[in-house]
């Protein structure tokens, strides 16, 4: 019976191993399915990364162009501002010269008017002396 018992034991172990192998086959099939899904996901993500890389290169190119435009615009604006500053300073200098000339002319006119005022005042004093008849010159002590 030893052999028969061993045979029965072996048959029992084989049947339990058979169910274990069935479960292992099912697990391997599921792992295969998951592996396929992961492969598909990796392919999609790789495609997205490639797309993002090309987008990144395009953005970097656009940024370089934008930086170049900003730099050139800044240079142009500085040049225009320097030209405007020079024009303003030249205008201020011209205005200053004009005001100095006008001031000199007004000083001349005022000095001429003052001369005329003293001539008129002197003539009025002489006329008053002649009109009042006081032609005597006071003597000095």
Image: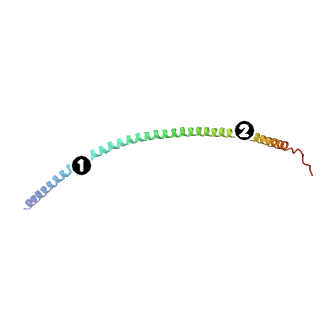
Residue under the image location 18 percent in, 51 percent down: 26
In the rendered image, the quadrant that contains the N terminus is: bottom left
Is residue 34 left or right of 79 when viewed as pictured?
A: left
Question: Mark 2 to mark 1: distance in Å?
Answer: 103 Å
Residue of label 1: 34
- Residue 83 in picture, x, y percent from top left: 59, 37
* Foreground of the two, 60 or 29: 60
- Residue 87 in picture, x, y percent from top left: 61, 37
* Foreground of the two, 117 or 46: 117
Is residue 44 left or right of 16 when viewed as pictured?
A: right
* Foreground of the two, 89 or 101: 101
* Foreground of the two, 20 or 62: 62
Q: How many marks?
A: 2
Residue under the image location 56 percent in, 38 percent down: 80
Can you tell which quarter of the image residue 48 is in?
top left
Can you tell which quarter of the image residue 125 is in?
top right
Mark 2 surroundings within 10 Å by alpha-carbon count, few (fewer than 14), some (14 through 19), many (20 or more): few
Q: Which residue sits furthest front?
A: 132
- Residue 56 in picture, x, y percent from top left: 40, 42
Instruction: Give the label on residue 105, or none.
Output: 2
Label 2 with label 1: CB-CB less than 8 Å = no
The image's colour scheme reads: rainbow
Instruction: Give the label on residue 54, or none.
Output: none
* Label 1 residue SS: helix
| Mark toward the start of the polypeptide (2 vs 1) | 1
* Label 2 residue SS: helix
Mark 1 surroundings within 10 Å by alpha-carbon count, few (fewer than 14), some (14 through 19), many (20 or more): few
Can you tell which quarter of the image residue 88 is in?
top right
Residue under the image location 7 percent in, 59 percent down: 4
Q: Nearer the viewer, mark 2 or mark 1?
A: 2
């Amino acid at each position: 019976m030893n052999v028969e018992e061993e045979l029965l034991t072996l048959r029992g172990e084989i049947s339990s191993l058979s169910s274990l192998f069935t479960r292992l086959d099912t697990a391997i099939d599921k792992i295969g399915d998951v592996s396929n899904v992961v492969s598909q996901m990796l392919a999609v993500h790789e495609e997205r990364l490639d797309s993002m890389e090309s987008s990144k290169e395009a953005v970097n190119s656009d940024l370089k162009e934008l930086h170049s435009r900003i730099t050139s615009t800044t240079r142009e604006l500085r040049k225009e501002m320097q030209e405007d500053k020079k024009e303003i300073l030249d205008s201020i200098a011209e205005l200053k010269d004009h005001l100095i000339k006008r001031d000199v002319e007004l000083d001349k006119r005022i000095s001429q008017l003052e001369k005329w005022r003293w001539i008129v005042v002197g003539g009025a004093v002489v006329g008053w002396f002649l009109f009042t008849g006081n032609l005597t010159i006071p003597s000095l002590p």
